[in-house]
Image (spheres, helix red, strand yellow):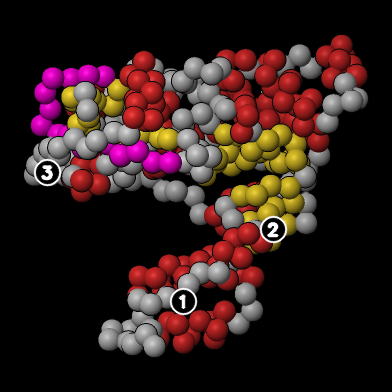
Amino acid sequence: MDSLPNADPAHSAAVSVSSNCSSSDRIAKELQKTYPEVFSSNLGLYKFLQATLRLKKNAKPVFRPKRPVPYAAIPKFDRLEANGVISKVNYSEWAAPIVVVRKSNGSLRICADFSTGLNDALDLHQYPIPLPEDIFATLTSGQYFSHIDFADAYLQIEMDQQSKQLLTINTHRGLYQYNRLPFGVKSAPAIFQQNMDTILAGLPGVVAYLDDVIVVGRTEEEHRRNLHAAFRRIAESGLHVRMEKCRFATSSINYLGYIIDKHGRRPDSEKIEAITKMPVPQEISQLRSFLGLLSYYGTFIKEMRSLRAPLDALLAKNAKFN
């Protein structure tokens, strides 16, 4: 077992003195002091390898015209260029338009719309995304939970030179190419998941679902050990986390649509309320979405098969919605 940094009597005494701070605050300060580089506000850079995109055989370049960019989003574009995420180029056979997305906190994100051509031309990166049930099997053994949030997660992965040429965007300032892995490329989730699994491989009580990392422990000390083990690996990788969105040493956690605590897991009441307020499906695509949500919580629905049978019948060809 790896020893904890500064795990000496003087350090332990210093931590225990802060009786006016919660366990969460103490651990947060301890991690920030021990791994300051991980909490840097600068964009991180994954050290172990560059990401590669592969085209399908006989794929043909697609070049799309630019789209207008809202004035409010221009500072976001400037930041991408200043951080080296994008670089200006004079020529490319490939080009995707950019799209501005409003995030849940109201801020804007500039993305490339690779659905206009590149995504269809790419061979999918063959790496599995973990099943929620496999993740829950680890989490339900814990009594202490921490959530690690990565800052601009995908953008911390550098692309190889050939892939950069595919990731060209057509903008109000001309052509730019992505030097980092952008959100919206269909291979991005699998690439990032593979990198996270590489970083955290073999660590007890640590799971990653894309850029959401959860650390659990059965006791406060075990949880602290698991956190330090995870942060050592993250520091070695070159990735950075967003302190303001991390949560440490909580008694429960909201994760993948469930509330998880020492008693196990239960559906998030807000998600269930959203399902009950969904409009009645009027066509098959809406029905499939509704049934997908029901299936996700099927373990907690008695007689699920018989209850959904009338809805399943509507999936048949030529079935009529009344």
**In the image, farthest residue toward the front:** 71
Position of 287 relative to 128 (above/below): below
Q: Nearer the viewer, residue 115 or 97?
A: 97
Q: Are marks 1 and 3 in contact (CB under 8 Å)?
A: no
Q: Nearer the viewer, residue 216 or 99?
A: 99
Residue highlighted by disc 2? 265
Check the image and report above or below for 280 versus 206.
below
Residue pointed to by mark 3: 59
Residue type of the residue flagged with mark 3: Ala
Magenta segment includes 97: yes
Q: Of marks 3 and 2, which one's residue comes earlier in the chain?
A: 3
The C terminus lies in quadrant: bottom left
What is the three-letter code of the residue carrying label 2?
A: Arg
Answer with mark 1 or mark 3, whichever residue precedes in sequence. Answer: 3
Q: Is residue 48 visible?
A: no
51 displayed left or right of 204:
left
Q: Image check: 84 left or right of 88? A: right
Residue at the far top in the pictured view: 10
Q: Are marks 1 and 2 in contact (CB under 8 Å)?
A: no
Alpha carbon distance from label 1 to label 3: 41 Å
Q: Earlier in the sequence, mark 1 or mark 2?
A: 2
Q: Is residue 91 magenta?
A: yes
Residue range highlighted in magenta = 87-102
Where residue 212 sits in the image (x, y, percent)? 55, 40
